[in-house]
Amino acid sequence: MTRGSRAVATAFAVAACHGGHAAPTPEDDGAAASTVTATATSTATASAAAPLDASALGVVDRAAYAAYTSALVRGRRATIAKKWADAKAAFTDALRARPNDKRALAERGYAELLAGDTDAARTDLEAARDTDDNALAAQAWFNLGLLGQDKDGGASDDTLADFWFSNQLHPSAAARAKIAGRSICPVSIDPKHAAATHASSWLAVAKILTSGVKCQAPKSETDAKALAETPGLPVSGQGTFYVVRSGTLDLQNCVENETHVVQTRGADFWVYPNMGTGTFTFMVPTQPAVDLARFGERVRASATISWTDETIMCTAGDASNEVFACRGDPGEEPAGMAHVPLPPDYTDFFLDGATHEIVSSIEDHASGRFALAGDGGRPVTLRPDGDGAAIAGLGCARTIPFQ
């Protein structure tokens, strides 16, 4: 199993409710079962970075929150009753009230998993796997592992990495059993080739990049070339490579824009596929930083992006004034919105300027979260090794060929 690079991440959390829960903890190992365990999960712990005083939090729309929690309850009941279509509809209602919400994405993904809708489940769980609540994130990674494993229990390297993530974030007997005795390299490798698109000028490049998006297209060759954000990287015999964003000239209107690498050689321009999509949240960009470097006979484009976890915080509705990440439990009162920075994710793309293709990509969610080096560097390292890349660090010691 391989995966393409992730563009924009939204965070994920699996919620508990009194009297039962819709999504299992890894300890349950229940996602593949035909029934749902009807016992309450442990309560989620608030992030250490979250404020304890509700007055420090942002405002929450209480009417929208009430609609959201009502939809969650309906979805959980439908999931326990094995009414998957009803569950999905209810969690979709929750997402309308609270777009990109972690819990709603998580529980919809779990209902889709149980229904056998694996593509939809993977989309929701991958969109929801990053959160500062480690116990909830562990459940997301565990369910992704269940999606990826074979019917006989066999697992690819990527699937083993999912179980590894789950156990690292919140150790459990079920996750430990999945990876027992196995050597884990917690990165995802996608060896598929992706072709670049040809253009004959910077204006033609800009037209490709602004097609189908809200960004305003440049009107002149000079303005179009200004989309290139960094000085070019000349590579002998292959031309010059530039990092280019579709929305650089129109940040006010282009709420979301993509990052590409453009290779130029005379009048030949080659637009490589998207290497990361950025958004603006409260006018703070989450656009990836993309660096170019030579990598043997190829070019390596390294994308680094950091996220902000937007979490609804609640109180228990009593005099304790304890503030915690909302679970959708009865009696909770929304106290406000917390914005917690998450560790960075890394994706490396390897470009072949002779064939005008991405020849491989590597996703690394582990380096930022688990083992930043003492100098703040990335512990997973990549170096050229013949016609491939050698990966080392965080248990990795392998070479992937560029096929």
Image: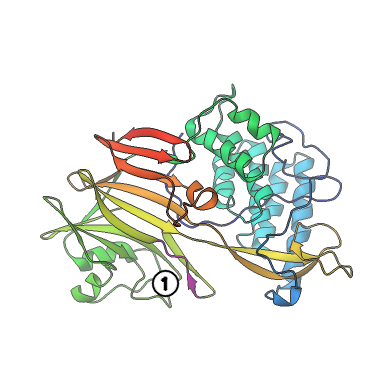
Q: Quadrant of the C terminus?
A: top left
For the image, the number of numbered tags is: 1
Question: Toward the viewer: 224 or 384?
Answer: 384
Give the residue at x 17% y 65%: 201
In the picture as drawn, the residue positioned furthest to the top comes out as 152
Residue at the location (56% across, 39% down)?
162
Q: Would residue 208 be counted in the magenta stretch?
A: no
Left or right: residue 160 versus residue 225 is right
**Point 27% across, 66% down: residue:** 230
Q: Crowding at label 1, few (<14), some or many (≥20) Cα neighbours within 10 Å?
A: some
Q: Residue at x 65, y 50 (%)?
A: 134
Eyeballing the image, is 238 above or below 318?
Answer: above
Q: Quadrant of residue 203?
A: bottom left
In this figure, which residue is indicated by the disc labeled 1? 254
Name the side, left or right, on which 3 lies relative to 191.
right
Q: Can you say whether 391 is above or below 217 in the image?
A: above
Residue type pointed to by label 1: Cys
Rendered position, 255 above or below 266 = below
First to last magenta residue range: 283-288
Q: Position of residue 102 (x, y in %)?
A: 64, 56
**Depth order, front residue of 6/253:** 6
Any part of residue 191 in sight: no
The scheme the figure's colours follow is rainbow
Residue 101 drawn at (x, y percent): 64, 59
Residue 40, by quadrant, is top right
Does residue 369 sit above or below 387 in this rendering?
A: below
Which secondary structure, mark 1? loop
Query: Does residue 287 belong to the magenta stretch?
Result: yes
